Image (spheres, rainbow, N blue to C red):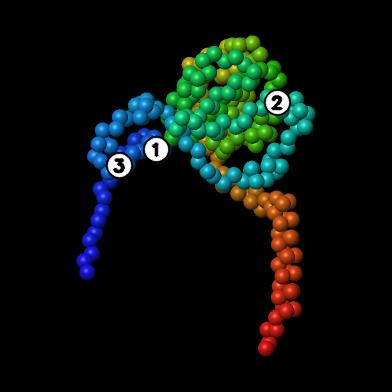
Amino acid sequence: QTCDTCYEQHYTVNWNAQSTIGSFSIDSRDSTSQSVWMTPDPARYNQIRVGDPCSRAREFVNYVKAVPDSLWHANPLLQQKFGAMIPPYPNGIYDLYHVDRVLAVGVPVPELREWNHALSVTLRRLGPSKQANVVLIFVNTGDRSYMQALEAAWLGGKKNDVLVVVGVTQWPHIEWVEVSSWSKQELFKVQLRDDLQGLDNVDRGQFMALIDKHITASFVRRPMSDFQYLEDEIEPPFWVVILAAVLGVVLSAGLSYYFYRTDLFE
């Protein structure tokens, strides 16, 4: 008898974007022919430029989300008044590594795409150096209590968020500004709010400069471990309690029937 070993050579080409927060896979090709190496680069690969800001979602333990009533008590009147004006939290990654953090709620913000790019470029440095994430919202209301409704709906945002809300009923005039963050540095929020509101009119360059200035100078991210005490207050959902009770009854009945039908001492 003879044994022959047969194999087939494969040639692979991968198109990846390497970044400081990991690799993003764009496309790949596999073939038994070396000609695969001559495959033209994908269009999306050719669009990548060194220095492009990029984002990636990360998971973390959020004790506040597990027991929201411990820290956030939604005002029913504010919920009713502003419910339709509260946007979803911006965590949707699109086009590999982009996310829109500048939101317009009933405000005709010119060049909104450029606003998002400018904020992403600003966070390109603030993210690694200060572990900060900024969400900027322009909302068409003169009522500052909108911020309370937003905080309740978003549970204060993520642990490293700086939520900047600007009330604009007539673009580009600024009626009010509020800043919310889990940061322990209360003065940071007050100073950023006052400087932004002092502009009177919305200006993209000045907004980014002030956000960069104040976060660099005084933002301190609060670790989620500060909220670990809430772990003792976490209760299982009602459906889990019911399921456990049903399983307990079924298991008890099953064991009772088994012991009734089986003589264990034969």
The quarter holding residue 192 reads top right
Residue 100, horizontal then vertical, whole percent: 52, 27
Report, in whole angstroms, how far the alpha carbon at label 1 lies from the one at label 3.
18 Å
| N-terminal label among 2 and 3 | 3
Please state which amino acid type lies under the numbered disc 1: Ser
Label 3 sits on residue = 31
Residue 92, horizontal then vertical, whole percent: 54, 33
Nearer to me, 68 or 9:
9
Which element is circle 3 on? strand
Label 2 sits on residue = 84
Q: Which mark is residue 25?
A: 1
Q: Which mark is residue 116?
A: none
Please state which amino acid type lies under the numbered disc 3: Ser
Q: Residue sitting at 44 percent across and 25 percent down?
A: 121
Quadrant for the N terminus, please.
Answer: bottom left
Nearer to me, 98 or 209:
98
Report, in whole angstroms, how far the alpha carbon at label 2 lies from the one at label 3.
52 Å
Q: Residue sitting at 59 percent across and 44 percent down?
A: 62
Tag nearer the camera, 1 or 3: 3
Please state which amino acid type lies under the numbered disc 2: Ala
